[in-house]
Image (cartoon, rainbow, N blue to C red):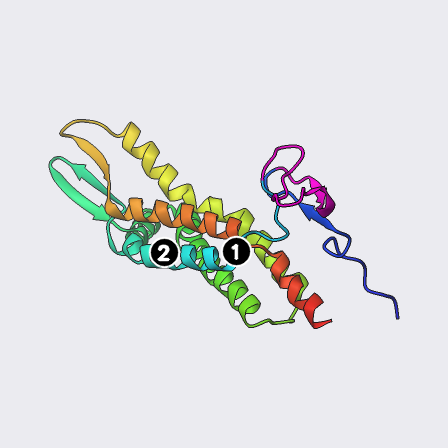
């Protein structure tokens, strides 16, 4: 049976969170925290308070996701009459207007992606808290997917920003943003910070401690 490969921690190596440079622990001066010799950012073996910060950010995003779907994301005012749309009602109107592909894109980016991202990060947090040893490679891959696709949830905000800038026809037609857009934008940004604050190496720490 082949021996387990040596880890970076066992070799006395740490990675800089800012620039990615690999630093040896012995470079730290007595009584001082280790800093990256290239960018001078503080270097830690693991992201400080990773689980606590990720949990707080996830809880905040989950709370904001409720008003993001309940309140109007934009209001179209035409000839003095306004029609407010939430994310789901906007998807329905797009589908009824024959724009099925655009409706599916908005539904995927603005409804499915945030829900799956919140669920996925919650699953990863629980797996570390409960010290699961189940499929660490797959959980690491899940984290990479969550981190890479989360930014695409901003497609709704981009669409509204373009519409608000273009549709300014006085009393004929105007588009205004709603409270839902503000909450939804906050959800996207906060979940991005949550995925950045989570340290996937914690998944593998459990495996090493058990061994």
Which residue is outermost to the front? 31
Sequence-wise first label, 1 or 2: 1
- Give coordinates of residue 170: x percent, y percent: 16, 27
Classify 10 Å Cα crowding around label 2: few (below 14), some (14-19), many (20 and above): some
Vertical arrangement, residue 169 with respect to residue 112, above or below = above
Check disc 1: other Cα within 10 Å, few if <14, some if 14-19, many if 20+. Answer: some
Question: What is the span of residues highlighted in magenta in the rendered image?
Answer: 19-41
Q: Residue 120: where, in percent of width, then height? A: 51, 61
* Residue marked by disc 2: 60
Q: Nearer the viewer, residue 22 or 170?
A: 22
Q: Element type at marker 1? A: helix
| Element type where label 2 sits in the image | helix
Which SS type dominates the magenta stretch? Answer: loop
Disc 1 to disc 2, C-alpha distance: 16 Å
Q: How many marks?
A: 2
- Does the magenta-highlighted stretch encompass residue 6? no
Residue at image mark 1: 50
């Amino acid at each position: 049976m082949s021996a387990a490969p040596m880890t970076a921690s066992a070799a006395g190596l740490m990675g800089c969170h800012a620039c990615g440079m690999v630093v040896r622990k012995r470079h730290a001066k007595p009584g001082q925290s280790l800093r990256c010799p290239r960018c001078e950012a503080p270097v830690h073996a693991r992201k400080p308070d990773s689980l606590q910060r990720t949990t707080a950010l996830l809880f905040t995003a989950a709370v904001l996701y409720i008003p993001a779907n309940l309140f109007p994301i934009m209001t179209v005012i035409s000839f003095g009459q306004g029609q407010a749309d939430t994310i789901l009602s906007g998807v329905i109107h797009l589908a009824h207007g024959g724009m099925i592909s655009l409706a599916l894109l908005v539904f995927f980016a603005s409804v499915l992606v945030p829900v799956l991202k919140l669920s996925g990060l919650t699953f990863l947090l629980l797996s570390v808290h409960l010290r699961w040893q189940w499929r660490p490679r797959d959980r690491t891959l899940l984290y990479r997917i969550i981190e890479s696709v989360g930014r695409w949830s901003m497609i709704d905000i981009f669409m509204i920003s373009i519409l608000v800038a273009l549709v300014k026809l006085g009393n004929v037609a105007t588009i205004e943003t709603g409270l839902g857009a503000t909450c939804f934008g906050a959800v996207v940004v906060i979940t991005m910070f949550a995925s950045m604050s989570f340290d996937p190496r914690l998944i593998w720490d459990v495996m090493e401690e058990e061994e």
